[in-house]
Image: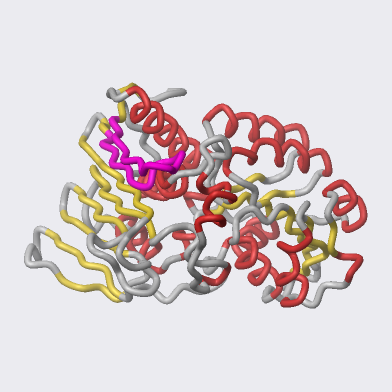
């Protein structure tokens, strides 16, 4: 066990996942929350109360927060279009950064984030919450063991009832029309929409399962709702040299997958040269087909232990030991995921197939 106490600050509460990440920090024996910061004080009230933070640990100015608390790690949860802006603000303070998904609002922004961190020699990583689901880790273990041969396709369906129907720790609520109008999730300028909210899960985790291979071209279509600036449903075809994959994003599923799996189910189907795996979000088993057992069979998901239960413990373990980061937290994997998202967004806008951007 390390004797170091990792000092962690949470800055910008645009994304409600900040509450989850602060709880994970609070529960980590070798970490402490030294400060939280948001320009809107009301958004920090629950966190300050839940984690017993003193008045002088709550800030509305990020400079003051960083200068006074001197964190080792900063958790950032800004709107998707502001990821680059916030990395540029925090990077000069020489802290490691855990950015809540997605990587960025665009590939150019993602590359600017990488460039902003490089002179300071600190870690930048992107948290994809689905990585910590036991089904995903079990499926990837079986892939690495060669159970289904070389993975050639991923089929992803991701979404929920809507981004304002739940808060931190999945506490349910019913959003008003006024809350939707005020939320960055429904603002095109701030990177809202189901595509930018959920496609990165499919493209980043799918790229991980494919062994880091990038596609050749992307075709996307989306559905928009009158009165809303952003999409609530998108379907994307992704062509690799060796096969076709797809990802679908939806706000407006019949139920939330962490409560009751909707139909179609949220999760992944992975097709390899020797078999298939289906791993649906939050389920206790995954289903496998192989040439030896084409009828298929259920595999209980692995029990996930430290340091692979959440991003806070995983990143701290990486920093302490030099152990490799799990695939989707690596910037090379997340960057390919971002390339596909960017290409899909442009494809839907232009209504045509496009080669992978930034290739």
> In the figure, is residue 206 to the left or right of 323?
left
> In the figure, is residue 4 to the left or right of 185?
right
Q: Is residue 237 magenta?
A: yes
Q: Is residue 333 magenta?
A: no
Start and end of the magenta stretch?
A: 219-238
- Quadrant location, the N terminus: bottom right
Colour scheme shown: secondary structure
- Quadrant location, the C terminus: top left
Front residue (pair 44, 289): 44
At horizontal 68% and vertical 67% (from top left) the residue drawn is: 22
Q: Is residue 238 above or below residue 47?
A: above
How many marks the image carries: the answer is: 0
At horizontal 71% and vertical 32% (from top left) the residue drawn is: 116
Front residue (pair 268, 223): 223
At horizontal 67% and vertical 30% (from top left) the residue drawn is: 115
Residue 158 drawn at (x, y percent): 35, 54
Front residue (pair 82, 126): 82
Q: Is residue 95 visible?
A: yes
Q: Is residue 2 visible?
A: no
Residue 76 drawn at (x, y percent): 68, 51
Q: Is residue 49 above or below residue 334?
A: below
At horizontal 50% and vertical 56% (from top left) the residue drawn is: 177
Q: Is residue 174 above or below residue 207?
A: below
Residue 57 drawn at (x, y percent): 86, 65
Q: Dividing the picture into quarters, in which one does residue 279 lie?
A: bottom left
> In the figure, is residue 164 to the left or right of 119?
left
Q: Is the magenta region chiefly helix, strand or loop?
A: strand
Residue 104 drawn at (x, y percent): 56, 39
């Amino acid at each position: 066990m390390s004797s170091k106490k990792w000092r962690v600050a949470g800055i910008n509460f645009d994304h409600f996942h900040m509450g989850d990440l602060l709880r994970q920090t609070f529960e980590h024996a070798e970490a402490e929350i030294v400060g939280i910061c948001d320009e809107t004080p009301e958004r920090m009230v629950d966190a300050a109360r839940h984690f017993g933070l003193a008045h002088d640990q709550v800030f509305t100015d990020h400079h003051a927060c960083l200068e006074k608390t001197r964190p080792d790690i900063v958790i950032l949860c800004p709107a998707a279009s502001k990821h680059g802006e916030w990395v540029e603000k925090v990077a000069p303070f020489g802290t490691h950064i855990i950015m809540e998904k997605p990587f960025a609002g665009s590939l150019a922004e993602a590359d600017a984030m990488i460039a902003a961190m490089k002179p300071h020699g600190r870690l930048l990583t992107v948290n994809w919450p689905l990585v910590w689901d036991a089904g995903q880790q079990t499926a990837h273990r079986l892939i690495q063991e060669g159970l289904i041969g070389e993975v050639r396709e991923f089929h992803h369906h991701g979404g929920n009832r809507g981004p304002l129907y739940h808060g931190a720790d999945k506490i349910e609520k019913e959003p008003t029309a006024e809350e939707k109008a005020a939320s960055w999730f429904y603002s095109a300028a701030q990177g809202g929409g189901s595509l930018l909210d959920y496609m990165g899960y499919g493209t980043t985790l799918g790229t991980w399962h494919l062994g880091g291979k990038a596609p050749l071209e992307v075709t996307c279509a989306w559905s928009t709702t009158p009165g809303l600036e952003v999409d609530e449903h998108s379907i994307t075809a992704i062509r690799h040299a060796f096969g076709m994959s797809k990802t679908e994003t939806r706000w407006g599923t019949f139920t939330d997958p962490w409560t009751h799996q909707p139909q179609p189910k949220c999760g992944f189907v992975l097709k390899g040269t020797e078999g298939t795996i289906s791993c649906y979000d939050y389920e206790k088993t995954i289903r496998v087909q192989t040439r030896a057992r084409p009828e298929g069979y259920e595999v209980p998901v692995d029990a996930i232990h430290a340091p692979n239960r959440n991003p806070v413990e995983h990143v701290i373990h990486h920093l302490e030991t030099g152990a490799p980061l799990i695939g989707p937290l690596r910037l090379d994997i997340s960057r390919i995921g971002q390339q596909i998202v960017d290409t899909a967004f442009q494809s839907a806008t232009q209504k045509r197939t496009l080669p992978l951007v930034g290739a």
